[in-house]
Image: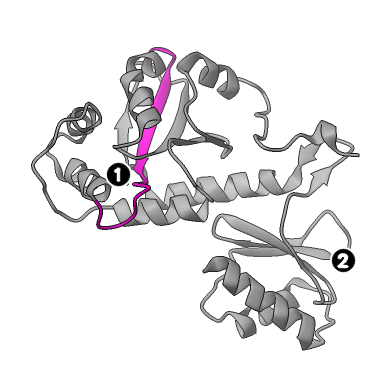
Amino acid sequence: MKSLLLGAFAVLLLTSGWVQADPKAVEAALKLALPTLKADSIAESPIKGVYEVVVGTRMFYVSEDGHYLMQGAMIDLKTREDVTEKKLSGARLSALAKIGTDNMIIFKPKIQKHVVYVFTDIDCGYCRKLHSEMDDYLREGIEIRYLFFPRSGKDTDSYYKAVTVWCAKDRNAALTRAKNGENLARKECKNPVDEHMALASAMGANGTPMIVTEKGTIYPGYVPAKELLKILEEKSEGMPGIDPAAAP
């Protein structure tokens, strides 16, 4: 749906004849094309004549003459930095902060050194593997903050398992039991599962587990505790899926 909306915005920009070169003009065009889509920020990008538009945890670029909309990573070839990823990292952390830790299931180490957010599916094999090694993560001082992303979608068996765990008196214990394959008696209550799923989708999740670090970097898939600790303690986390050294 979002891609269709952005496509509609692109068509409007191409046909509008809009030529004003400032963020307010971008905002005006956005409101005209997509009145229900709210831009969180509109600002000049590092490229002259190109503006960056952040919507939730997504970002795209618009030329100042309104003729072009661009999506993708912007790389600074001098510093080898993914400029787009750096901006999106902050947006992801802001979105997680809006959900709040009260709406997550948290496993805390005795001494916290780092924090990661993990989108999990109770029936996912590698999610279960990660959870079975929880003591390893806690031993390394890594706090695990769980959010649910049942890959089968809403109103499925995995979805109801997530809701049941959330509605349990002891959510941590219930999650462990469910991940160990125990069939818990179904429960229902007010829960954040839909909100978790919406955020995971907005972040582009297509599998689980999906780890979001304290710097907002995404690591799709299972990462062992010691390897994750090494990643978290690097001064600048690498950007998975981007190899600036391969740029011409």
Residue 46 point in image, percent of width and height: 83, 53
Which residue is disc 1 drawn over?
102
Q: Where is residue 198 shown, x and y percent of the image?
A: 41, 57
Task: Tell me how far mark 1 sits from mark 2, CA to CA.
Answer: 42 Å
Above or below, 42 relative to 242: below
Read off the magenta span.
Answer: 139-156
> Which residue is depicted at the point 29% across and 37% down?
122
Secondary structure of the residue carrying tag 1 is: helix
**Between 133 and 37, which is closer to the camera in this rendering?**
133
Disc 1 crowd, CA 10 A, few/some/many (<14, 14-19, 20+)? few
- Of the two numbered discs 1 and 2 in the rendering, the one whose residue sits closer to the viewer: 2
How far across and how far down the image is residue 216, in percent? 56, 40
| Helix, strand or loop for disc 2 | loop
- The residue wearing badge 2 is 49
Q: Is residue 151 above or below residue 138?
A: below
> Mark 1 or mark 2: which comes first in sequence?
2
